[in-house]
Amino acid sequence: GAGVSQTPSNKVTEKGKYVELRCDPISGHTALYWYRQSLGQGPEFLIYFQGTGAADDSGLPNDRFFAVRPEGSVSTLKIQRTERGDSAVYLCASSQGQNQPQHFGDGTRLSIL
Amino acid sequence: AQSVAQPEDQVNVAEGNPLTVKCTYSVSGNPYLFWYVQYPNRGLQFLLKYITGDNLVKGSYGFEAEFNKSQTSFHLKKPSALVSDSALYFCAVISPGYSTLTFGKGTMLLVSP
């Protein structure tokens, strides 16, 4: 079955570079979430989309981080001027509604050298 | 604020024995509570949820959880553990006024043969 798909699965880049992480949610899911998971921690919320709009971006750590979902389906998380502290697994999830179970992708492991 | 505490970093149990993974929460208002499981290098998989109704919730793979409002707990249980249950387990909560989940730091469950 078609679950949440995230690409790439791994990304290694140098400090200062720009990266884009892609999430393809389950078809028909209106809600889409981005999380960041550091080693030994639970996922930390970054941003939530309901349809095309960012309903809550309060978890984005600073203005280097930005996400879009232009057609209400695929979403892209964009990180500018990457720093070593950005290294983590970035998880995407989608759901049928705000309080419904979220279905997660396998994540993108981002390593900043 | 909403928060989740998983007091045990690791739980060890022998195969065939009952298991409990503890979770307590702090919210304003009525909580929606969730358990997820994460296998190595994979995203989180939904196990079960409590929204309202019966305090004992049954989920996937024989797991269940008991909602206790007075103790603000939502412990995960299984009557008979399997070696294949070994994984990282996360408790999560969402409450009125919040748009997304807050996760605990996770508990590693190790089931020995």
Image (cartoon, rainbow, N blue to C red):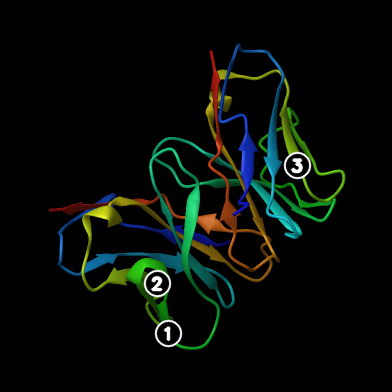
Q: Dot 1 falls on which chain? A: B
Q: Position of residue B98 (x, y in %)?
A: 66, 63
B59 vs B77, left or right, is right
Q: Position of residue B57 (x, y in %)?
A: 42, 79
How crowded is the residue under tag 3: few (<14 C-alpha within 10 Å), some, or many (20+)? Answer: many
Helix, strand or loop at label 2? It is strand
Amino acid tagged 2: Phe
Asked if labels 3 and 1 share a chain, the reply is no
Query: Is any atom of residue A104 visible in this view?
Result: yes
Q: Which residue is mark 2?
A: B74
Q: Residue at x 50, y 69 (%)?
A: B33
Gap in angstroms between the C-alphas marked 1 and 2: 9 Å
How crowded is the residue under tag 1: few (<14 C-alpha within 10 Å), some, or many (20+)? Answer: some
Q: Dot 2 falls on which chain? A: B
Q: Residue at x 30, y 70 (%)?
A: B77
Q: Position of residue B38 (x, y in %)?
A: 42, 49
Q: Position of residue B75 (x, y in %)?
A: 34, 70
Quadrant in which the N terminus of chain B is drawn: bottom right
**Quarter of the view holding residue B89:** bottom left
Question: Of the numbered discs in the image, which one, if any, rests on residue B19?
Answer: none
Asked if labels 3 and 2 share a chain, the reply is no
Question: Of the numbered discs in the image, which one, if any, rests on residue A75?
Answer: 3
Amino acid tagged 1: Asn
The image shows residue B72, relative to residue B4, as above or below, that is below
Q: Residue at x 68, y 41 (%)?
A: A23
Amino acid tagged 3: Ser
Q: Residue at x 54, y 69 (%)?
A: B27
Q: Nearer the viewer, mark 3 or mark 1?
A: 3
Q: Nearer the viewer, mark 3 or mark 2?
A: 3
Query: Is any atom of residue B108 visible in this view?
Result: no
Q: Dot 3 falls on which chain? A: A
Q: Which residue is mark 1?
A: B55
